[in-house]
Image (cartoon, grey):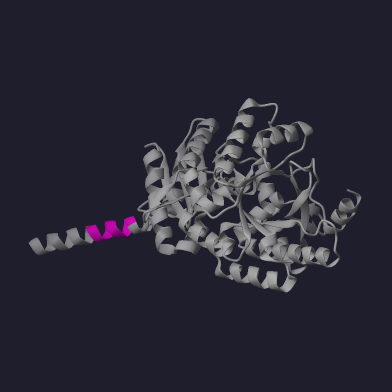
Amino acid sequence: AITHIEDVTEQRHSAEALQWAATHDELTGLPNRTMAMATVGERLKGSAIGAVALLFIDLDNFKVVNDSLGHGIGDELLRAMARRLRAIGRSSDLLARFGGDEFVIVVDATAGHDAMAIAERTRAAINQPLQIDGSDLYVSGSVGVAVNDRAGVTADELFRDADAAMYRAKARGRNCVERFAVQTRQSSVMALRTASELRSGMVRSEIVPYFQPIVELSTGQVVGFEALARWLHPERGLLTPDQFLPLAEETGLIGEVGAAVLRDSLAQFARWRDGALSFADAALSVNVGTRQIVDPGFLRLLRETLTETGIEADSLWLEITESALLADVKASTVALRRLRNLGLHLAVDDFGTGFSSLTYLKRFPVEAIKIDRSFVRGLGIDAEDSTIVEAVVNLGHSLNLSVVAEGVETPLQLGRLRELGCDRGQGYLFGRPRPAGIVEVERAEA
C-alpha cells in the first residue's frame, strides 16, 4: 500500500513538472508564450472594452551583448532583466518571456492611459544598468502597447497589434513606447517591404554617402565632412537614415550598409585628393555601431580600405553613439583601443542623450564629443539648453577633448557656441548633406 502511495505521489509530481515545463520558460522561470496567449484569451472573455492591455517588449541591444560577450552572459542578462521586470510589476499583471529577447506583460487595465504609464515605467527600468559578471551592461527597450479597444478582439489580434506597435517604436529610433493605431499596422507592412527592398538595394549599390561639412567655429574654415548614408530608392526617392537604418539593424544588414558607406566615402575622398581639390585635405567622419566595432572583420575592412584608397588613417574619424558604447563597456573599450592603434580618431556621437558618465568617458580612448542637436536647438532661447551645452563644452575641454555641436541652424546658435568656446560645428547653417558632385560645386563657389 505504501509503495502504491509513493508511486501515485511520484506520478503527480511528474505530471506537475510536465505541466510547469509546458507553461514556463526554463531560463527565467517566467510564464512562457503558451501561458501568455492563454491568459490573454481568458481575460478577454467578457471583459469590458479597454480592460485588457498587452505590452510587447523587445530588448534593443541584446544581440550586441550576445555577439560580443557570448550566450552565457546573454542568458545572465535575460535572467537579471526578468527579475527586474518582475520586481516592478503589479500582482494583477502577468509577465512572460515570449521568446529570445522579447517579454510581454498582460495588464489588467481600465484605460489605455494606465497601460501607457506602466509601459513608460517598464522602459525606464530596462534602461538602468545591470550588474553582470562584474560589469555594468546597458540595454534599452522598445515597447509596443495594444488595448482591446473594440468588441470581439481575439488574443491573436492583440498580440499582433502589440507586436506591430513595438516595431513602430523600433522604427522611431528605439528606446521608446508606441501605442497601436490602425496606421501602425500599415507602417509594419511598409517596414517589412522596406527590409526586403533594402537587401536588393544593397546589391544594386543604392546606398550612397552624402557629405555634410564640419566647420572650425573660430575661423569658419571647413575642416571635415561627415559621411551620412542615403538610399536612392528607385520608387520612393531619397530616403534618410531614420527611414532604413533601424531596419538594417533589425535585419542584420547594418554591417553591410556601414561597410558600403565607409568604402564609398573613402574612395570619394581619394578621388578628391587625386584631383587636388582645395577642400580635399579635410578629415572624413563616418558613423559606426557597436556591432561593427566589436566585429574582428571590421578592423580588417578598415585596414584594407585605407590601403586601397591611399587615405591615411589620421584623416579618418569614426563616430559611435554614447548609448551604443555603454551597451557593453568592456567590449567597446577593447575595440576602441584596437581602432586607435590604427592611427585613426574616435568621437562620441549624440553626447548627452544616453547614460552620460564621466567615468566611462575617461576610460574610452576618444578625442572628441559631439553635442546632440536637441540641446543646440534651444541655444540663446532656452536657458536650460544653454546651461547643458556650456557644461558639456567645459567637460570636454577639461578632458582635452574637442567639442563639436550638431544641428547648428541659426546665427544666434552660432554666436552662442562661439561665446561658450565650442570648437567645431555642423548643421544647415554651414551646409546640408549633399552628394559628392554638389559638394564639389558648392566648395568651388565658397
The magenta stretch is: 13-20
Left or right placement of residue 213 versus residue 30 in this view: right
In which quadrant of the rendered image does the N terminus lie?
bottom left
- Relative to 231, is 118 on the left or the right? left
Taking the image as drawn, is residue 160 in sight? Answer: no
* Residue 310: image location, x then y, percent: 73, 70
The residue drawn where x is 70% and y is 63% is: 262
Residue 197: horizontal and vertical position, in percent?
73, 61
Q: Is residue 77 visible?
A: yes
* Position in image of residue 405 (x %, y %): 68, 42
Q: Main secondary structure of the magenta part?
A: helix
Q: Residue at x 56, y 48 (%)?
A: 322
Residue 428 found in image quarter: top right
Residue 66, how many percent across, how many down?
A: 47, 61
- 148 displayed left or right of 99: right
Q: Is residue 309 left or right of residue 388?
A: right
